[in-house]
Structure formats: structure tokens, C-alpha cells
Image (tube, rainbow, N blue to C red):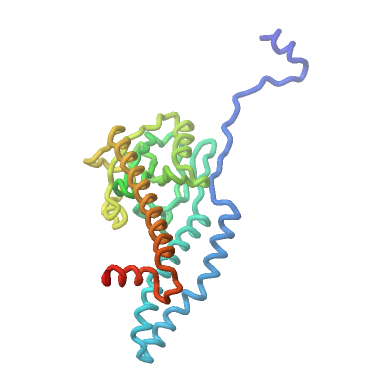
């Protein structure tokens, strides 16, 4: 040992154990700015809808009121999604520190973040397990594959991390990667629970309170492969159907030109009936 210190030179210090780096996950400034701008841009139009509806009802314009009511319902849904994304951008934060992980994440039910948030400061020595699982929503036409992660503490309580879409992951909050980093700091393995088929209605309506529950309809690798093959077939069928509609439309325009003064579809119908 003395020879090693002498070889390092006088005044040299032996390298100690390297401390783990602090990692912070959160929305970028650009993301916060964009959603804030979109919210402020749409807010005046959204706020004017109740007054517009009241004026039409007061004046007795019932037909216009029905159309405006449908527009208001769609506009309200869009504004809700914008507010959800804005709140997530402003509030969500994950700080993986040296001795604990600090979380400020949505605490509501369902795979989409809602307006209710919870903050936790969890020491690594209190983490018993880190669990992940895949959840499949929908069928072969439009399947949605989500991957969820949560922490299991030594008192058997759970802390939800969140979901990420397999098709379009969120680069600001890659929850599977976050779960892996937390598991490494806590010295526990990542326990993958498998893939399960879930009901979107039950999930969104809040009939399940946990992000990871034991479900009866677990999906194996073979079922996932079959689902992916069926989805590709449906996509190709829709593509070919659109191509056929375009070809038929072009053919009708050639056979029944607009110079006749009638729409091509009506010309076709009249020719069929008259012939």
C-alpha cells in the first residue's frame, strides 16, 4: 500500500467510490410554452360559448343552438385535453437523488394523467419491489399497448409512476427507464408482471384503483403476436379500401364529367335508374 501511494506521488489522493448522479425528469421549457400558448389562445373562444348559447336560446334560434351545442361539447373535450397536458407539463417531476427519489406525478385513475397530483419523497431503503406490466386496450382494429410501472414499499403500500405508450413513448417521462433506474438505486430487480387485456371503460371510469392489478385475462407472447398480425391486416384493408374509393371517384369523374351540371354520384344514380 505504501508503494502504491508513493507511486501516485506526494499529495495525491486515492480515488474514492463515485457517487451516483442526480437525474431529473420533467417537461422542457418549449413544451410548457407551447401548451400555455395553446391554452391562452383557445380560452377566449371557449369562455364565449356559454354566452353564445344563452343568446341563441333567448332569441329562439333552436336549430343554430343544436349545432353550436355539438361544437361546444367537442370544444370542451379539446380544452380538457389541453388543460391535462398543460398541468402535466407544469407539475410532473421525477428527481432520482442519491438517497431517495422525489416524485410529483398524477395520482388519478386511468392511463391518462388527470388534474389530481401527489408528491412523495421515498428513501431507497423503503422500496421493496419495482413492478412493470403491459396493458392492451381495444381489439385488432385499433389496439393500444401501454406499459405501466409502480413502486412497492416495505409497508406493502404502492406508489404509481405512470404509463407510457409502446407506439409513441413520452421522451420527457420514460417511466420504464425511470423504474429501472430507481430499482438499480434501491438494489432490487424490476419485476415484469406480463401483459394483460384491460377494459378501457372500466379503467377510465375508475373501477380499478391500482395501476397494476391481477387480471384474469393475461396475454402471452403468442396472443400478442396474433393481435399484431390481425392489426396489420386491418390496416392494409383500410388502406386498400381508401385506394379503391379514390380510384372509383376518379373513374366517376371521367365517365360522368361535371359539364352535365350534376354531381358525378347523382349522374351515376340517374344513369343506373334510367338504363
Tell me the quadrant of the picture where the C terminus can be found: bottom left
Q: Where is residue 71 shown, x and y percent of the image?
A: 40, 73
Could you say which is closer to the camera, residue 209 or residue 97?
Answer: 209
Q: Where is residue 207 shown, x and y percent of the image?
A: 26, 54
Tell me the quadrant of the picture where the N terminus can be found: top right
Q: Residue furthest top?
A: 3
Q: Is residue 85 left or right of residue 128?
A: right
* Residue at 40% from the left image edge and 32% from the top image edge: 190
Q: Is residue 256 left or right of residue 92?
A: left
Location of residue 196 (image quadrant): top left
Could you say which is closer to the camera, residue 15 or residue 25?
Answer: 25
* Residue at 60% from the left image edge and 27% from the top image edge: 18
Q: Residue furthest bottom?
A: 59
Q: Residue furthest front?
A: 275
Could you say which is closer to the camera, residue 41 or residue 3?
Answer: 41
Q: Where is residue 208 shown, x and y percent of the image?
A: 28, 51
Q: Is residue 168 left or right of residue 63?
A: right
Amino acid at each position: 500500500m505504501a508503494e502504491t501511494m508513493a507511486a501516485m506521488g506526494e499529495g495525491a489522493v486515492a480515488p474514492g467510490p463515485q457517487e451516483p448522479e442526480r437525474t431529473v425528469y420533467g417537461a422542457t421549457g418549449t413544451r410548457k410554452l407551447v401548451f400555455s400558448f395553446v391554452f391562452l389562445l383557445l380560452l377566449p373562444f371557449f369562455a364565449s360559448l356559454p354566452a353564445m348559447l344563452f343568446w341563441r336560446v333567448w332569441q329562439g334560434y333552436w336549430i343554430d343552438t343544436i349545432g353550436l351545442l355539438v361544437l361546444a361539447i367537442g370544444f370542451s373535450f379539446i380544452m380538457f385535453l389541453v388543460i391535462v397536458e398543460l398541468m402535466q407539463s407544469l407539475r410532473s417531476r421525477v428527481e432520482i437523488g442519491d438517497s431517495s427519489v422525489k416524485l410529483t406525478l398524477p395520482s388519478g385513475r386511468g392511463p391518462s394523467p388527470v388534474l389530481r397530483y401527489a408528491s412523495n419523497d421515498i428513501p431507497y431503503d423503503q422500496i421493496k419491489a419495482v413492478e412493470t406490466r403491459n396493458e392492451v386496450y381495444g381489439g385488432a382494429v385499433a389496439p393500444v399497448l401501454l406499459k405501466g410501472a409502480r413502486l412497492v414499499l416495505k409497508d406493502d403500500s404502492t406508489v404509481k409512476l405512470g404509463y407510457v405508450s409502446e407506439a409513441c413513448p413520452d421522451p420527457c417521462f420514460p417511466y420504464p427507464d425511470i423504474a429501472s433506474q430507481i430499482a438499480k438505486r434501491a438494489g432490487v430487480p424490476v419485476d415484469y408482471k406480463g401483459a394483460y387485456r384491460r377494459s378501457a371503460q372500466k379503467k377510465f371510469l375508475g373501477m380499478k384503483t391500482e395501476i397494476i392489478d391481477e387480471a384474469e385475462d393475461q396475454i402471452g407472447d403468442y396472443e400478442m403476436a396474433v393481435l399484431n398480425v390481425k392489426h396489420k391486416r386491418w390496416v392494409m384493408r383500410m388502406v386498400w379500401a381508401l385506394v379503391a374509393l379514390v380510384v372509383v371517384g376518379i373513374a366517376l369523374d371521367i365517365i360522368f364529367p361535371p359539364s352535365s351540371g350534376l354531381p358525378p354520384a347523382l349522374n351515376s344514380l340517374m344513369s343506373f335508374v334510367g338504363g
